[in-house]
């Protein structure tokens, strides 16, 4: 029995070491970012960490929201359309974009046919989309965020975009966040 255990351990070690490339590097990544060949950028956004964000002064439910989406000017393909947008709290995921039961924030796809576009909407439209939940963007929530313990000087929402390129490939962007401040 002891010899059988040793043989199985030896075979397992050979199997593990067999996964390495000749240069000693593991050539089957366990976890890897999915990075598209054509990057989608949020021009004018700020980023500290993973997700870009726009900081917007909250001036009531009519506050305008503008999100600038672009691909680099030297990209091999341009944006054909913004096919779908999902908005909500920062807990939204790429799976929300591909799920048919999750409504499109846009009334219809937005044709672009170029390297960039600007999606313009309002807080009223955002609140209508997230359907009157406790997560609505209101002056009271912005004020409460600044006085909470610990204080956060903003309330935050996220958008995910399904971008279709000219060659009909699709890209789900990383979250673009909106931070509403006093």
Image (cartoon, rainbow, N blue to C red):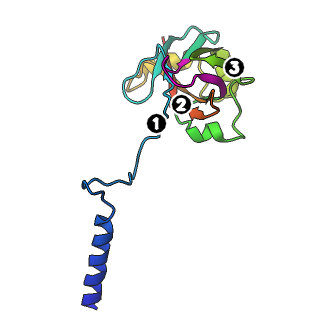
Magenta region: which residues?
Answer: 69-83
Residue extending farthest bottom = 1
Q: Residue at x 37, y 26 (%)?
A: 150
- Would you name the residue on which mark 3 appears? 111
Label 1, residues with CA under 10 Å away: few <14, some 14-19, many ≥20: few
Q: Position of residue 127 (x, y in %)?
A: 66, 22
Q: Position of residue 180 (x, y in %)?
A: 51, 16
Image quarter where the N terminus lies is: bottom left
- Would you name the residue on which mark 1 appears? 35
Q: Is residue 14 left or right of residue 84?
A: left
Q: SS class of the residue under badge 1?
A: loop
Q: Is residue 90 left or right of residue 47?
A: right
Q: Are marks 2 and 3 in contact (CB under 8 Å)?
A: no
Q: Is residue 154 a member of the stretch shown in magenta?
A: no
Q: SS class of the residue under badge 3?
A: strand
Q: Are marks 2 and 1 in contact (CB under 8 Å)?
A: no
Towards the viewer: 60 or 160: 160
Q: Earlier in the sequence, mark 2 or mark 1?
A: 1
Residue 51's mark? none
Q: Is residue 73 left or right of residue 14?
A: right
Towards the viewer: 57 or 93: 93
- Would you name the residue on which mark 2 appears? 173
Residue 84 sits above or below residue 139 on the image: below
Label 2, residues with CA under 10 Å away: few <14, some 14-19, many ≥20: many
Residue 110 at least partly seen: yes
Towards the viewer: 28 or 141: 28
Q: Residue at x 48, y 19 (%)?
A: 74
Residue 132 at least partly seen: no
Q: Earlier in the sequence, mark 2 or mark 3?
A: 3
């Amino acid at each position: 029995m002891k010899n059988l255990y040793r043989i199985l351990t030896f075979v397992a070690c050979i199997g593990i070491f067999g996964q390495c490339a000749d240069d000693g590097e593991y050539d089957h990544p366990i976890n890897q970012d999915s990075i598209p060949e054509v990057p989608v950028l949020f021009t004018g956004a700020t980023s500290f960490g993973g997700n870009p964000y726009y900081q917007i002064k909250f001036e009531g439910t009519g506050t305008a929201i503008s999100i600038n989406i672009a691909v680099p000017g030297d990209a091999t393909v341009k944006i054909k359309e913004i096919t779908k947008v999902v908005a909500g709290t920062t807990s939204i995921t790429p799976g929300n974009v591909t799920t048919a039961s999750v409504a499109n924030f846009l009334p219809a796809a937005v044709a672009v046919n170029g390297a960039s576009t600007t999606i313009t909407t309002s807080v009223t439209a955002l609140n209508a989309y997230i359907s009157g939940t406790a997560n609505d963007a209101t002056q009271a929530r912005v004020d409460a965020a600044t006085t909470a313990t610990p204080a956060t000087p903003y309330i935050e929402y996220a958008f995910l975009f399904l971008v279709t390129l000219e060659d009909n490939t699709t890209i789900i962007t990383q979250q673009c966040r909106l931070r509403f401040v006093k």
